[in-house]
Image (cartoon, rainbow, N blue to C red):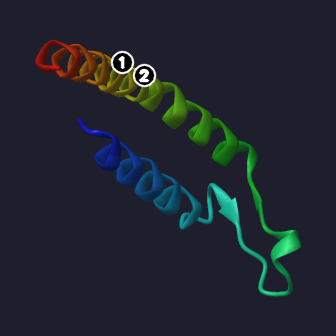
Amino acid sequence: MNRNAIKDVLYGGLIELASNRKFYYTSSVNRQYCHWTDEGEAAVKEFLVLMTPMIMETEDQTLDQRARDLVMKELKA
């Protein structure tokens, strides 16, 4: 999965969790009263724990590709 796809999954996942009243309380009075419920905090933590290995793998792949590109650039020079 590439970096942009992971960003979309993270954003979409958080929006879906926040759209569920079981996980996120939304106040019509003021945004300062909105908050994650205890179940919501647990769900966000579980979601991030699941996503982190994919994020780190993508970062490693990006770093490896940058290193290969630099080596190839130096070899061509």
Rendered image: mark on residue 56? 2
Residue 32, position as x, y percentages in the image? 87, 71
Q: Residue at x 26, y 39 (%)?
A: 2
Give the quarter of the image for residue 57: top left
Count the labels in the image: 2
Rendered image: mark on residue 48? none
Is 77 in front, or is 48?
77
| Quadrant position of the N terminus in the picture | top left
Do callouts 2 and 1 mark residues in contact (Cβ within 8 Å)?
A: yes
Amino acid bearing label 1? Asp
Task: Judge left or right: residue 47 versus residue 5.
Answer: right
Is 70 in front, or is 42?
70
Rendered image: mark on residue 60? 1
| Above/below status of 76 relative to 27 | above
Give the quarter of the image for residue 23: bottom right
Q: Separation of disc 2 and disc 1 at Cα? A: 6 Å
| Above/below status of 68 relative to 9 | above
Residue 10, position as x, y percentages in the image? 45, 48
Residue 71, position as x, y percentages in the image? 23, 13
Residue 53, position as x, y percentages in the image? 41, 20
Q: Residue furthest left?
A: 76
Q: Residue at x 30, y 16 (%)?
A: 67
**Crowd class of label 2 (few under 14; some 14 to 19; many from 20; radius 10 Å):** few
Badge 1 element: helix
Q: Residue furthest front?
A: 77
**Crowd class of label 1 (few under 14; some 14 to 19; many from 20; radius 10 Å):** few
Q: Residue at x 47, y 26 (%)?
A: 52
Amino acid bearing label 2? Met
